[in-house]
Amino acid sequence: MATELEKRGCDITGPLWSAHVLDSAPEKIAQVHLDYLHSGADCISTVGYQVSGMGFAELGRPAAEAARALRESVAIAETARQEFRRGPGRRVFIAASLGPYGAALHNGAEFHGNYDIGFDELVTFHAERLGVIAETNADLVALETVPSLEEGRAITTALTGFRNLRAWVSFTCKDVVHVAHGERLADCADVLEVVPQVVAVGINCTAPHLIGRLIAAARAGTTKPIFVYPNSGELWDAAKRRWYGSSNVGEFAAMAAGWYEAGAQAVGGCCRTTPAHIRAVRDVLDTKVADVPIGM
């Protein structure tokens, strides 16, 4: 979403990231959703990742505006889905994207998870936003880029207050065994295993070349479906606040086929991936799924 909004001339450099565009050009968000749907996406995620009462307060805006922004992010995705369904569209899911506490700090803390906050406060942070999403028509909640076991536990605790919600919890990882903060991905997945509201365990905002082995690491801790949506292959320079390196759409799609074969039930893309990446992944996976005999 962010990559595509930038291409359309949107300024996402502020602390709310893509959510700034909710104020300036919501129609561009809807168009990006449509571009991904027409490229083969089965699930679109909202621009709520960076939205929180804490983040809005930093800008002198009340918590009520943060709640409104979360609701609007879902409504825009609904509009795009309705437009897509006017044609011969397939079933589409809307995932309300919610970032970790570190995202609200907008200083890269989600990539190490060293927070100066207690567990109860972390639960409250997530519960405030989940309470808003529980009143929308989102099909799922995507709790994304989670860096630590403790934040995974805080999320599951917050979820228990909203029995109508279904969510996936997705971790960002630093190698083929560990999440960003250092705990084993298998242990993080194990914490989610006993939570009925968590429908899948995810890996996102992670280098694509790590994903194959991370699928195995996650599977060691869970029987739930595994979702993977890594970055494009480019790298983020936090000091200079810029991406560098390159991404090859064909190579990404080929790796995606390997992730599917390794046991991922859903495959997509995170930072710097584009509709072209999703189209290529869709084409490759449609071929793979067609090769699976009916009943298997």
Image: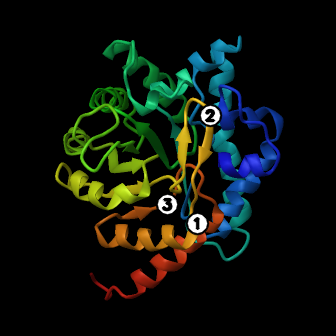
Q: Residue at x 49, y 67 (%)?
A: 252
Which mark sits nearer the N-terminus, 3 or 2? 2
Amino acid under disc 3: Gly
Q: Relative to 90, is 265 on the left or the right? A: left
Task: Using the rendered view, name the quadrant where residue 292 is placed.
Answer: bottom left
Amino acid under disc 2: Arg
Where residue 234 appears, x then y in whole percent? 54, 52
Q: Residue at x 66, y 51 (%)?
A: 78
**Residue corresponding to mark 2:** 241
Q: Residues within 10 Å of mark 3 (few under 14, many from 20)?
A: many
Where residue 259 appears, x then y in whole percent? 36, 67
Residue 162 numbered mark, or none: none
Callout in the foreground (1, 3): 1
Q: Residues within 10 Å of mark 1 (few under 14, many from 20)?
A: many
Q: CA distance from mark 1 to mark 3?
A: 8 Å
Residue 268 numbered mark, or none: 3
* Element under disc 3: loop
Amino acid under disc 1: His
Where residue 129 appears, x then y in whole percent? 51, 27
**Residue corresponding to mark 1:** 277
